[in-house]
Image (tube, coloured by chain):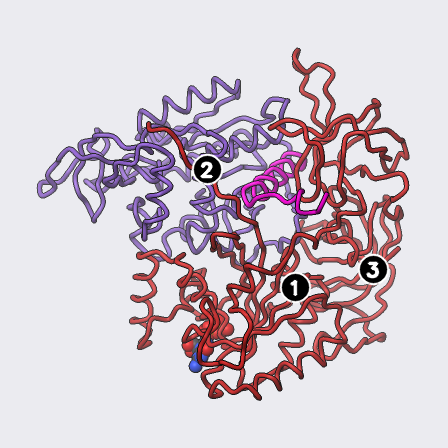
C-alpha cells in the first residue's frame, strides 16, 4: 500500500486535531464544560466531543448562556439534543442576573442582551469551578480571534490578555492553571465557515430550523433584516413585512440579523455561502459593527 | 428539504508559516493570496479601504487585512502569530503569519512548529540579509520539510534575471550549511501580483510555478514518520455502561507509524507486551491507521495502562530515559534559563519535572556561531542544553520524529510556557 492511502481529507485532519484538543483538555482539567449556543459551531464541537469519547458518554456537562431572548426553535433543538445524548445541561440565565440586579438591562429600541452574557457566563464558571470551558469560536471569524490560542488562559476575573498569551507549539497544549483561573478551549479554531458547513453535510449533523429558509415577519435596520419579536420592536420608520429568510448565525434574537434566502437544504446553503461576499459577522451581528475593535474589547472582559 | 446531492469536497490540509523582515512585503503577499483566491469578503475590503483612507494611503493597502489586535493597529506593526485561512479546490491552507519583529524568534518558532511549508520573503533590492539567514535557520531547526524563498519586489529591480540569480546563489550557499530538505525559489511582485497566483509574463526567463501553484503542488504526504510506531496514550476510555461493560480503550493521536489490528506492541514504561485487538473510532473500526489520526486502541490483554504511557513496537522502541539533550528556544521575558533551573516539562501526553544540568552552548542565530562560554539563555535565545527529568520519557530525536522529539518547558510558579525544545538525543 502506498502512503497516500493513509492520507486524511482536510475535514478528517481537522476533526482529528479537534478530537486531540478536546481529549487533552479533558485529561488536564478537573471540571470541563462545553458552551452550547445552539448554533452550528457549537453543534459541531458537541458532535466532535461525542465522537472523541465514544462509546463512553460525554464526560462533561453542556452549558447554555440563556439571554432569555432566544429563538424558540433553538431552545427546542437544544433540549432535544441534550435529551438524545443523555447529557447534563446547565442553563446560566441572563434574566436571573437582571432580576438579581447583577447587571442592568440596556434601554431603548437597540437594546441587546448580548453584552450581558459575559456576567452570567463568568458567574457560572465561578459557581461550578469550571476550569476548561469549550467554545466554538473560529479564528477566521474575526481579527482578534485570529491571534487567540487554542488553549486560551483566563485569570481569576476571566480576563483575556492578548499581550501575554502563552506560546503554543506543535500539538502540545499547556492547560496548567491555579485554582480560580481557567482555560477557554477552542477545538475548531482552525476551521473556516465553509469547513463547518461541509462537515455538517458530511456528518449529517442536525441544526436548528432557523438556518434554513422560512417565512418571517421582519423589518430592516442597519441594512439587516431583524426578526420582529417580543424582544425587539421596530421603530416608527421601520415598517414590518413578511419575507423569505434564513439566519447565517444563531444568537440573541435582538441582535442577530436574517437575510433573504430560499436555501432549503445544506447543499443550497453551501452554494450560497460560497457565492457570498460578506463575512458572517458582517452579515448578521449588529453588535460587532459598532466598532472595529468591538470583539477584542469584549473578549478582554471575559466574553466567549 | 430537497435531497442532498452534493458531497463535502476532499481537500488536503496544508500548514504554512510565512516570515520576512519588516517591509519585505509579507502582509502584501498574504493579502494578495487571500484576495486573489477570493477569500476576502466585501465588508473586510470596505474596512481596509476605510482604514487606508484614514491613514492617507493612496491605494488600498492589502497589508491591513492581516493586521490584528488594537495595540498592533495603533503601532502599525504585527507582534504576534496570527492564523489565516484560504483554500483552492485541491488544498486548504492554514497559514501562521509570523511577524519579523522584536519577538520574531519566539513567534517564528511557534509558527514553524506545525508548518509543512515555510515561505520566506526577501526584498530583491536588499537580497539575503541577516534576518533571512535567521529565519531560514529557524525553519531548519524546527524541521519544516519545505522551504520557499520568495524574492519580492522584482518590479523595483526591473524584473532583472541576473539580480534574481545572484540572490538564489547567495542563499543556496548559506542554506547548504543548514538541514533543509527541499528548497524552492520564486521571483515575485506581491504588490503587482506577479507570480503570486498567476504566472507573470514580465519575467519570461522564469519558467517555474507561481507561489500559489507551488503551494498547491508540493508533495507533503510523505513528510510524516510512517515507520516508527508511536502512540502516546492520551485518555483511557471506560464507558461503565451496561452495553459496554468491559470496554477499555486507549484514546490518542497517532504520533508515527502505520498501525493494524494484530500488530504486536509493547507498552512503556511497564514493558508489557500485547497485540492490537482493534483500532476504534466513532465511525467504526479501522483496518489501518497512521498519523495524525485520532483513534482508540484496544489491546488483546488486560493491562494497567494510563495517560502518559507510550504504546510502541517490540522491535522499534523510542529511547526511554531521564537524561535528554536538546536544542531549546527560551521564550520567557525577564527570566533566564541557566544550569540548575527547575521547570515542568510536557512531552507528548506526559508531564514531569526537570532540572537543567548543563548549557552546552548558546547559538548565534545570525552567524550560527556557538558560544560555549554562555552562562544563560535570555528571551528569544537558542541553545543546546542537557536535562534530567524526574520520570523517564519515551522520546526520539526531533530530526526523526517531530511528535516524539518535541517538548515544552513550563514555569512551575506562573504556569507559563517558557521554552520549546527539540530533542537531539539521550
Ligand atoms: N514596489 C513594490 N512594493 C512592494 C511590494 N510588496 C510590498 N511592497 C511595499 O512594501 C511596503 C511593505 O510591505 P508590507 O506588506 O507591509 O511588508 P511586511 O512588513 O513584510 O508585512 C509597503 O509599502 C508595500 O506596498 C512589491 O512587490 N513591489
Residue B117 in the image: above or below residue A59: below
Residue B386 in the image: above or below residue B319: below
Name the element at disc 3: strand
Q: Nearer the viewer, mark 2 or mark 3?
A: 2
Residue placed most toward the observer, B193 or A38 = B193
The 10 Å Cα crowd at callout 2, few under 14, some 14 to 19, many 20 or more, is few
Say left or right for A87 vs A270: right
Tell me the purple chain: A
Picture coordinates of residue A281, whole percent (x, y): 35, 48
Labels 1 and 3 touching (C-beta < 8 A): no
Q: Is mark 1 within 8 Å of ligand 1?
A: no
Residue A90 in the image: above or below residue B50: above
**Distance Cα–Cα, label 1 vs label 2:** 31 Å
Check if residue A237 falls in the magenta segment. Answer: no
Numbered tag placed on residue B7 in the rendering: 2
| Chain B, colour shown | red
Quadrant for residue B46, please give it: bottom left
Picture coordinates of residue B407, whole percent (x, y): 74, 52
Residue at mark 1 shares a chain with residue at mark 3: yes
Using the rendered image of the protein, determine whether residue B143 is visible from the camera's viewpoint. Answer: yes
In the picture of the structure, the residue carrying the numbered disc 3 is B424
Name the element at disc 1: strand
Numbered tag placed on residue B146 in the rendering: 1
Residue placed most toward the observer, B30 or B287 = B287
Q: Nearer the viewer, mark 1 or mark 2?
A: 2
Using the rendered image of the protein, determine whether residue A106 is visible from the camera's viewpoint. Answer: no
Picture coordinates of residue B303, whole percent (x, y): 84, 25
The 10 Å Cα crowd at callout 3, few under 14, some 14 to 19, many 20 or more, is some
The quadrant of the picture showing ligand 1 is bottom left
Check if residue A9 falls in the magenta segment. Answer: yes
Amino acid at each position: 500500500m502506498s502512503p497516500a492511502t493513509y492520507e486524511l481529507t482536510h475535514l478528517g485532519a481537522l476533526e482529528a486535531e479537534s478530537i486531540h484538543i478536546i481529549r487533552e483538555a479533558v485529561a488536564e482539567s478537573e471540571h470541563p464544560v462545553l458552551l452550547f449556543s445552539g448554533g452550528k459551531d457549537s453543534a459541531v464541537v458537541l458532535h466532535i466531543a461525542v465522537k472523541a469519547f465514544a462509546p463512553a458518554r460525554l464526560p462533561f456537562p453542556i452549558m447554555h448562556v440563556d439571554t432569555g431572548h432566544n429563538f424558540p426553535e433553538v431552545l427546542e433543538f437544544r433540549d432535544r439534543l441534550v435529551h438524545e445524548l443523555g447529557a447534563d445541561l446547565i442553563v446560566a440565565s441572563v434574566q436571573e442576573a437582571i432580576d438579581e440586579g447583577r447587571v442592568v438591562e440596556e434601554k431603548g429600541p437597540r437594546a441587546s442582551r448580548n453584552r450581558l452574557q459575559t456576567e452570567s457566563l463568568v458567574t457560572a464558571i465561578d459557581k461550578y469551578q469550571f476550569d476548561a470551558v469549550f467554545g466554538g469560536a473560529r479564528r477566521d471569524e474575526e481579527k482578534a480571534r485570529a491571534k487567540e490560542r487554542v488553549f486560551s488562559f483566563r485569570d481569576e476575573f476571566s480576563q483575556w490578555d492578548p499581550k501575554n498569551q502563552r506560546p503554543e507549539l506543535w500539538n502540545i497544549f499547556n492547560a496548567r492553571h491555579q485554582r480560580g483561573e481557567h482555560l477557554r478551549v477552542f477545538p475548531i479554531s482552525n476551521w473556516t465557515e465553509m469547513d463547518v458547513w461541509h462537515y455538517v453535510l458530511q456528518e449529517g449533523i442536525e441544526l436548528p430550523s432557523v438556518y434554513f429558509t422560512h417565512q418571517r415577519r421582519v423589518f430592516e435596520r442597519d441594512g439587516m433584516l431583524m426578526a420582529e419579536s417580543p424582544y425587539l420592536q421596530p421603530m416608527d420608520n421601520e415598517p414590518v413585512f413578511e419575507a423569505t429568510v434564513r439566519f447565517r448565525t444563531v444568537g440573541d434574537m435582538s441582535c442577530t440579523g436574517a437575510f433573504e434566502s430560499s436555501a432549503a437544504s445544506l447543499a443550497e446553503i453551501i452554494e450560497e455561502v460560497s457565492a457570498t461576499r460578506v463575512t458572517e459577522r458582517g452579515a448578521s451581528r449588529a453588535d460587532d459593527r459598532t466598532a472595529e475593535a468591538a470583539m477584542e474589547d469584549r473578549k478582554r472582559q471575559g466574553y466567549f | 428539504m430537497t435531497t442532498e446531492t452534493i458531497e463535502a469536497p476532499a481537500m488536503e490540509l496544508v500548514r504554512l508559516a510565512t516570515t520576512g523582515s519588516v517591509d519585505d512585503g509579507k502582509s502584501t503577499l498574504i493579502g494578495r493570496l487571500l484576495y486573489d483566491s477570493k477569500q476576502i469578503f466585501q465588508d473586510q475590503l470596505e474596512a481596509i479601504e476605510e482604514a487606508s483612507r484614514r491613514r492617507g494611503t493612496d491605494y488600498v493597502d492589502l497589508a491591513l487585512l492581516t493586521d490584528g489586535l488594537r495595540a498592533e493597529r495603533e503601532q502599525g506593526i504585527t507582534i504576534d502569530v496570527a492564523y489565516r485561512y484560504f483554500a483552492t479546490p485541491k488544498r486548504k491552507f492554514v497559514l501562521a503569519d509570523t511577524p519579523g519583529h522584536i519577538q520574531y524568534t519566539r513567534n517564528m518558532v511557534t509558527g514553524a512548529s506545525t508548518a509543512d511549508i515555510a515561505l520566506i520573503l526577501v526584498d530583491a533590492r536588499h537580497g539575503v540579509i541577516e534576518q533571512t539567514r535567521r529565519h531560514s535557520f529557524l525553519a531548519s531547526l524546527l524541521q519544516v520539510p519545505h522551504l520557499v524563498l520568495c524574492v519580492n519586489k522584482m518590479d523595483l529591480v526591473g524584473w532583472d534575471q541576473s539580480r534574481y540569480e545572484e540572490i538564489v546563489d547567495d542563499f543556496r550557499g548559506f542554506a547548504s550549511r543548514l538541514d533543509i530538505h527541499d528548497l524552492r525559489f520564486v521571483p515575485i511582485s506581491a504588490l503587482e501580483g506577479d507570480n503570486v497566483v498567476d504566472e507573470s509574463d514580465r519575467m519570461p526567463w522564469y519558467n517555474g510555478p507561481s507561489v500559489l501553484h507551488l503551494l498547491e503542488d508540493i508533495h507533503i504526504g510523505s513528510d510524516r514518520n510512517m515507520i516508527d510506531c508511536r502512540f502516546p496514550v492520551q485518555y483511557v476510555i471506560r464507558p461503565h455502561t451496561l452495553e459496554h461493560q468491559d470496554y477499555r480503550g486507549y484514546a490518542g493521536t497517532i504520533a508515527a507509524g502505520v498501525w493494524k489490528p494484530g500488530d504486536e506492541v509493547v507498552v512503556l514504561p511497564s514493558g508489557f507486551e500485547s497485540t492490537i485487538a482493534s483500532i476504534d473510532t466513532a465511525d467504526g473500526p479501522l483496518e489501518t491507521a497512521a498519523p495524525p489520526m485520532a483513534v482508540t486502541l484496544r489491546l488483546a490483554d488486560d493491562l494497567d495502562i494510563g495517560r502518559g504511557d507510550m504504546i510502541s513496537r517490540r522491535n522499534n522502541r523510542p529511547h526511554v530515559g531521564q537524561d535528554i539533550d536538546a536544542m531549546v528556544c527560551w521564550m520567557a521575558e525577564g527570566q533566564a534559563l541557566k544550569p540548575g533551573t527547575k521547570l515542568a516539562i510536557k512531552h507528548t501526553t506526559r508531564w514531569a519535572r526537570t532540572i537543567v544540568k548543563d548549557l552546552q552552548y548558546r547559538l548565534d542565530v545570525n552567524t550560527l556561531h556557538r558560544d560555549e562560554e554562555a552562562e544563560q539563555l535570555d528571551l528569544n535565545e537558542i541553545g543546546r542544553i542537557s536535562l534530567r527529568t524526574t520520570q523517564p520519557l519515551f522520546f526520539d530525536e526531533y530530526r526523526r520524529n517531530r511528535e516524539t522529539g518535541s517538548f515544552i518547558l513550563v514555569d512551575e510558579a506562573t504556569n507559563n510556557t517558557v521554552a520549546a525544545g527539540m530533542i537531539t538525543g539521550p
